[in-house]
Amino acid sequence: MYDEYLPHYDYLKSIASVVANKKIHLLMFLTNSLKLCIDRAAKRHASGGHEVKPEIIVEMYQNTFPLFGQNKNLFHSVRMMNVTNKSVR
């Protein structure tokens, strides 16, 4: 179901298996606004960054928490930052 995204978590699993005494900390930036994600991607592309199609952003947005839930045991600590178009909390 989420196979195209698993390599990111597989990479973390490989790190954790090789260096068991190391701790992985996650700082996750989140937003409740899918429109904000799409708008920011368009601005990055307009500024010379690579293009990410809106349908890919929608899929990634929808899969963020299911994937995190399946892999949260990889992290020693997790901090989530709420991002709006005006601030980060």
Image (cartoon, rainbow, N blue to C red):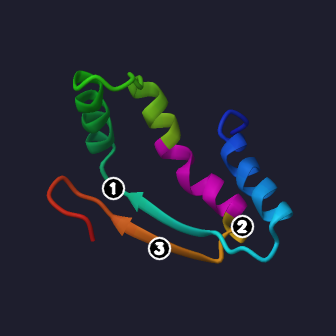
Q: Amino acid at mark 1?
A: Asn
Q: Which residue is mark 1?
A: 32
Q: Is residue 82 above or below residue 2?
A: below
Residue 71 placement (x, y as % from top left): 70, 61
Vertical relation: 35 (above or below) 68: above
Q: Earlier in the sequence, mark 3 or mark 2?
A: 2
Q: Mark 3 highlights which residue?
A: 79
Q: Which of marks 1 and 2 precedes in the sequence? A: 1
Secondary structure of the residue carrying numbered label 3: strand
Residue at the image position 64 percent from the left and 69 percent from the top: 24
Q: Quadrant of the N terminus?
A: top right
Distance, label 3 to label 2, CA atoms, is 14 Å
Q: Is residue 65 magenta?
A: yes
- Tell whether 55 sits left or right of 88: right
Nearest to the eye among marks 3 and 1: give it. Answer: 3
Distance, label 2 to label 1, CA atoms, is: 24 Å
Q: Which residues are magenta?
A: 61-71
Q: Secondary structure at mark 2?
A: helix
Residue on which the image places disc 2? 74
Judge left or right: residue 29 versus residue 4. Answer: left
Left or right of 42, for residue 21: right
Where is residue 37? Give x, y as percent: 32, 41
